[in-house]
Amino acid sequence: MMAMKILRAIAVVVMAVGPLTQSHAGSITDDERIRGKMDAPITLIEYSDFTCGYCVKFFRETWPRLQAKYIDTGKVRFIYRDYPRADQGVAVEAAVAARCAGAQGRYWPMHDRLFSGGGRLDSGAFKGFAKAIGLEPVTFAKCFDERQHLESIFQDRQEANRWGFHGTPGFILMRTVGGPTEKEPAIAIPGAFPFEEFAEEIDRMLASAPRS
């Protein structure tokens, strides 16, 4: 019964935002923020905030199972997009820290370190995190102190809004090749739903994927 209620919530969101097209998704070639095979048949995009409790819940409870079953097996590629809920403060700083780590090829170690804090982050901790994951400290400090990548971070948030999300986390599930179509629209998942609900939508999409 609960699963049916959850799936109805997902379906309502899809209908509420109308036909979802590739233009909503923007570019999905952010190599530093992609996990999994580039040519995986399905793409899952997360819009998230490093200080969001429900985002932490997804990272701890759902992400490891998704990674093991779908990302590491080449079925799904995963893309992380920033959605700091405030215009300034520690959530924005965390997003900047992750982007600055990405500029040194260490985006995911910083991403995982930030979420491992359980959403309780402090402005003074980021340079210590950078040192712990082996970043060049002067380069990181310059990037972080200058708040580089801010424009791109807020572009991610605007993109999430165009999908119909106004809170975190939010997820978009779509075909990698061709993107959403009227026949096979993207699926919008508004929240940290259980693994089983992600799996049901992914399996349905995989079952109807063209055979190579």
Image (cartoon, helix red, strand yellow):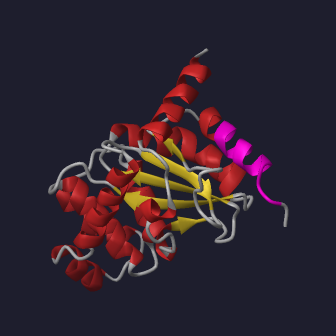
**Quadrant containing the N terminus in the rendered view:** top right
- Image height of 208 relative to 199, above or below: below
Which residue corresponds to the image point at 60% horizontal and 23% vertical from the top-left? 3
User: In the rendering, at what x and y percent does residue 132 appear?
Assistant: 38, 68
How many circles with numbers are drawn on the protein?
A: 0
Q: Which residues are magenta?
A: 199-210
Residue 208 drawn in magenta: yes
Considering depth in this image, is 123 or 166 the residue closer to the camera? 166
Where is residue 125 drawn, in percent x and y? 24, 60
Q: Residue at x 84, y 67 (%)?
A: 212
As rendered, which of 191 and 19 lies closer to the eye? 19
The image quarter containing residue 75 is: bottom right
Residue toward you, 152 or 112: 152
Question: In the picture provided, is 210 more to the left or to the right than 25?
Answer: right
State the image coordinates of residue 44 (x, y, percent, origin top left): 56, 54
Q: Is residue 193 above or below residue 188?
A: above
- Magenta segment includes 13: no
Q: Residue at x 69, y 52 (%)?
A: 70
- The answer to whether any part of residue 51 appears in the image is yes
- Prevalent SS, magenta region: helix
Please state if 211 lies on the left or on the right of 112 as rendered: right
Residue at position x 69%, y 64% from top? Answer: 40
- Farthest residue toward the top? 1
Q: Position of residue 15 (x, y in %)?
A: 48, 38
- Res. 128 in view: no
Using residue 196 as the reference point, say whether residue 82 is left or right of it.
Answer: left
